[in-house]
Amino acid sequence: MRLRHFVSTLLLTVALPLAAPLQAQDLASLQADQVAITGDQVLNATGAVEVRYRGQILRAQGVRYDKGTDRLSITGPITVTDGSGNLITADAAELSADLSEGLLTSARFVLARQMQIAARQMFRTQGRYTQLTDSVASSCEVCTVAPTPLWEIRAARVIHDEQERQLWFDKATLRFGGVPVAYIPRLRMPDPTLDRATGFLSPRLRTTSDLGAGIKLPYFIALGPSRDLTVTPYVSAQSGRSVELRYRQAFRTGTIEATGALSRDRILRGEDRGYVALKGDFGLPDGFRLTFSGLAVSDPGYLVDYDISDMDRIDSRIEASRTRRNEYVSGRFVNFRSIRDIGGQLESNATLPTLVADFTWHRRFSGGPLGGEAGLRFQTHSHYRSSDSWTDSDIDADDIADGRDLSRVSLRLDWRRSWVFGPGLVGTMMGEGNADIYSIRQDALYEGTIPRLHGTVGAELRWPWVATSDSGASHVIEPVLQLVAASSDTADVPNEDSTLVEFDEGNLYSMGRFSGSDAREAGTWLNAGVSWTRFDPAGWSSALTLGRVLRTTDEGQFSEVSGLAGSSSDWLAAGRITFPAGFSATGRVILDDGLDLTKGEMLVDINRERYGLSASYVWMQADAAESRTVNTNELHLDGRHSLGQSWTGRVSGRYDLEADRLNRANMGLEFRNECLRVDLSLSRRFTTSTSVKPTTNIGLSVDLLGFGGAAKAGPAGACRG
């Protein structure tokens, strides 16, 4: 019988014999242009044959099923797909009825739509193993205009273990552009569906002016579904020997990661160098979260010499916290250790507050009979210096004692309520009260227990104006006046947490601009400003803010460079513009009455498909109050540009315009397509100190994509055009 289209759909018992009654998943569905049954043993299907069985789909020109042998004879072209994205093609096949065993000739095996293996013959056994002979494996695109893949592995035999998701190569040769570059008698690699497998990771070549040329060869060890260890030996030409370790483990409620390294090199001859670091993140009962991190290093230059980090003050901490809609709780212990070079000498850790303990409880609630919203904050703080030296009694009050230890308990109550009246005016009343108790030790000037009270009240008036222009653009103009009065008792305490003061649009309308609790803004002042925001129908927007602070008296709390000194502060001007096409710019300047620049910064970000640029510029005058002995005048650039379909160039650098020198420069070139990633980097650090000197680093890494992992493939362009 022959029909032009599908004439029959037969449910056939081609599953393996079962003693129990057949289930739905044990039945196969057959569709074909023509189906013929000879006796009750042989079925012949021809023309657009499609067999569906247990998630697998077989398509062929013809299928012959012999019930007596329970075998399928298939004529091609043949394709077999499954739900995991695997594909098999062949010219002919002899398979078991459940497709788990058999022989395919002139076969091609595609794993997870990434890795393809062509072979003369392919054998399927035990429903688990696929063996391919005289095979060629690659994840590169191959077509008529580009018949030779960028890279390929030729092997006498390849075995794919479907259960373990591993590929085994016998007598393998790695070729680039058809040229053999390496012979490996036996090679094991993960298939594209496996993210974690024990074995070597991609090596990385690294050359530095201090250590010479070297190679890193990471070896990944999967210790189980929730643990792994990576061991990375590093050998350099100039007597450098190092081993890096990384251990990770996932628990039901969190994760930990431990890293470290041990090295010997010519930089510190005969000395062992290294570091160890630990970090973790865990969920605790009742919504709390525990985080911790710690780092210890053998010497000040190690982290920079081995390109681990540029940090010069090491921060190790443990913290438990919880954040809810109206509540925040946090407790932490912090240890600081400095490896900073200051004037040719390392900063003393004995005079730094190296041990710090903090606790904060902050609660927001209704203002009750007063209306509005109120808040209550309870906070404790302690820090310890290991130095035992005391400050002489005649020292200036702004100097910090070498061994001063301090503890503080603070309580703050605040309230705020707003009203709308008249022609859209928004009026706000606010208040805040603070009570502190200080306990100070090893300081003759501040020794003992010191209580302190501070109160602030304020009134604010805003008048937002909204208009739409003929072009359809929306404009919002908002003038703001905020009157604040603050008073404190006469208690004098050392200022250790509020020495750095910023004046920006974020605190222009503020009841206090000190960042910590040791210093409280006092007196009576008026915060005045106006902002203008424009929303264009084309999708871009801009915003401008202008303001300053006017005081009844100068309390002498701020330095000249801060922009807040005197009875009238400097002018603050800030602007922002954003385009939907990936361009944004933000700028901020502080100008005195003569329009001389005190501080300024500019940020520009361009993010397009083919190129991107992030640039920042900072200018600040020298300020002894902020331990800044010279002007800061720096430019930082970070850019990328597509140099073709698969090539990307990168460049970044930091230039000190005050010293007229580069501090750091980096260049990079990356090639990435559907099957290969090559990354070449060059960096130069120009700064020098007693612990580090200018160095140049060159790095090279090569990744063959398609063998598992999370590396992102690039564009496949070999067959275009």
Image (cartoon, rainbow, N blue to C red):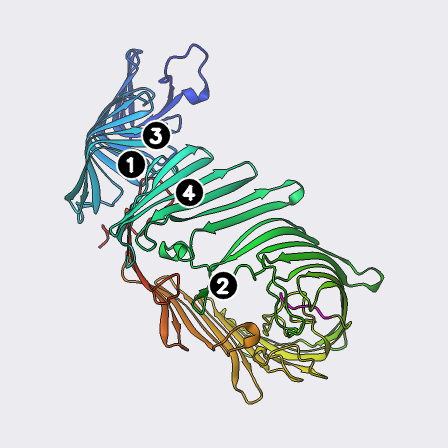
For marks 1 and 4, the one nearer the N-term is: 1
Please give the name of the residue rendered at 39% of the width and 65% of the height, measured from the top-left corner.
689
For label 3, the residue is 57
Query: Which structural element holds mark 3?
Result: strand
Give the image location of residue 291, x and y in percent: 57, 47
The residue segment tinted magenta is 492-497
Lower sequence index among marks 3 and 2:
3
Q: CA distance from mark 1 to mark 2?
A: 60 Å
Q: Which residue is mark 1?
A: 110
Please report contact status of discs 3 and 4: CB closer than 8 Å, yes or no.
no
Q: Assign a secondary structure to mark 2.
A: loop
In the shown orientation, is residue 511 left or right of residue 294? right
Q: Secondary structure at mark 4?
A: strand
In x, y percent, where is residue 234? Answer: 31, 46
In this rendering, which labeled residue sits more in front, label 3 or label 1?
1
Q: Amino acid at mark 4?
A: Arg
Nearer the camera: disc 3 or disc 2: 2
Front residue of 85 and 502: 502
| Direction from residue 70 to residue 245 in the image, left or right | right
N-terminal label among 3 and 4? 3
In the picture of the structure, the residue carrying the numbered disc 4 is 246
Which numbered dot is residue 347?
2
Residue at image x 51%, y 62%?
A: 348
Local secondary structure at mark 1 = strand
> How far apart, in angstroms, are the residues tagged by discs 3 and 1?
15 Å
The number of numbered discs placed on residues in the rendered structure image is 4
